[in-house]
Amino acid sequence: MKTAFINIKELIQIEDLPKKYVSGKEMSKLPTLKNAFLIVENDIISDFGTMDNLPNNIHFNSIIDVTGKLILPTWCDSHTHIVYAGNRVQEFVDRIHGLTYEAIANKGGGILNSAKLLQKTSEEDLYAQAATRVEEVMQLGTGAIEIKSGYGLTKDAELKMLRVIKKLDKNYPITIKATFLGAHALPTEFKDRKNEYLTAVIENILPTVAKENLAEFIDIFCETGYFSVEDTEQLLEAGKRYGLQPKIHVNQFNAIGGIQAGVKYNALSVDHLEAMRDEDIEYLKNTHTMPVALPSCSYFLSIPYTPARKMIDAGLPLALATDYNPGSTPSGNMNFVVATACIKMKMTPEEAINAATINGAYAMGLEKTHGSICRGKKANFVVTKKIPNYNFIPYSFGNNHIDRIFIEGVEI
Ligand SMILES: N=CN[C@@H](CCC(=O)O)C(=O)O
Ligand SMILES: [Zn+2]
């Protein structure tokens, strides 16, 4: 099955040779072709070029004329928690009335609130709720996503979450990567016994996660009041023994050394980074750890944005993700993330699109197959409505620019 997309106004994020990620000044380069064609063979991109080079000796099963429209790779959302039960809309209202995220968590709300509900929810119901969200984010142009456990906090409930993630991956055409986040918060039953909980995570849950091949990555919320740097190192050391690579929550509210622990254990990514010291930026230089910013979380909680300008200007790479979860970011819209990164973090549209595509793909180990328009990569792309240029996507924020979406060569 061969399909040609012709008369593409601009084909965005093209690559001849796949790269791992882009950093620093490279992030401001977004390679494109104007007046282009794109050829898809089954589920793979087989060729692209300018219209004057469209091969005339190939039989196409279908030719799609997209005059006036742009094509760009689907978004790569490398940090989400979309397997959750119910919602925390009451906490949202409580925050409007003046309670802080921290105060809500301290009185048993927050993550523990979601865990209580998830533990009572059947696997089928949890799957159905999460599936609706997967369908929603696909329609928003996301073609690959990472999903974490962490709202279970018991062995049964953590494994239930991870099985749901696996089933979503099997049943949906987008690529889904799973992360084990057993150390997301301290369950009430373990109050003042954090070490016992961590030991249970390491000795009781982690071996089953690994044995049943339920996750590729390991995560921990390294934060004051949650898990310390010492806890983080202990967990990552155990994860390493089972072949799970770290992708960790660090520097959301306080900079306590989580980045350093992540880098020490070869983290694929360190995520949040709203509280960054100069020494943290310095430490990330010359590593292969991708910093990940989550601007929708900053927006929703009214906390500082990750200092993207400072980080990119220092030569670092940066990825953007949604953090879709019921407490701090009940939104999985990568279009909003890209726009907010430009508007609030002063990233250029080129930087933001790179961060949400190729760098996002790297942050979940998918840079060989996702994140760009490249021969041999998965045919995952968005056809926009008729818009003037790619700057228009973040500029006209909150509006829907998507006309059609193709995942593995099939329109969804
Ligand atoms: N910060 C830790 N975990 C989630 C939020 C969890 C919640 O509030 O339910 C996050 O990444 O923002
Ligand atoms: Zn998160």
Image (spheres, grey):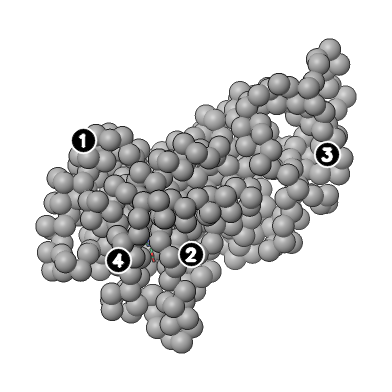
Q: Can residue 208 be seen at all in this image of the molecule?
A: yes
Distance from disc 4 to disc 2, alpha carbons, whole Å, reads 19 Å
| Residue at image point 22% right, 51% down | 155
Residue 202 or 298: which is nearer the viewer?
202
x%, y% of residue 188? 20, 68
Name the residue beneath numbered marker 3.
Answer: 66
Name the residue beneath numbered marker 1.
Answer: 241
Q: Secondary structure at mark 3?
A: loop
Distance from disc 3 to disc 1, alpha carbons, whole Å, reads 50 Å
Q: Can residue 15 be seen at all in this image of the molecule?
A: no
On-image quarter of the N terminus:
top right
Q: Secondary structure at mark 1?
A: helix
Earlier residue among tags 2 and 3: 3
**What's the residue type where badge 4 is placed?**
Lys
Mark 4 near mark 2, Cβ–Cβ under 8 Å? no
With respect to residue 128, does 289 lie above or below?
Answer: above
- Cβ of mark 2 under 8 Å from ligand 1: the answer is yes
* Mark drawn on residue 329: 2
Labels 4, 2: front one: 4
| Residue at image point 44% right, 68% down | 87
Labels 3, 4: front one: 4
Earlier residue among tags 1 and 2: 1
Labels 1, 2: front one: 2
Earlier residue among tags 4 and 1: 4
**What's the residue type where badge 2 is placed?**
Thr
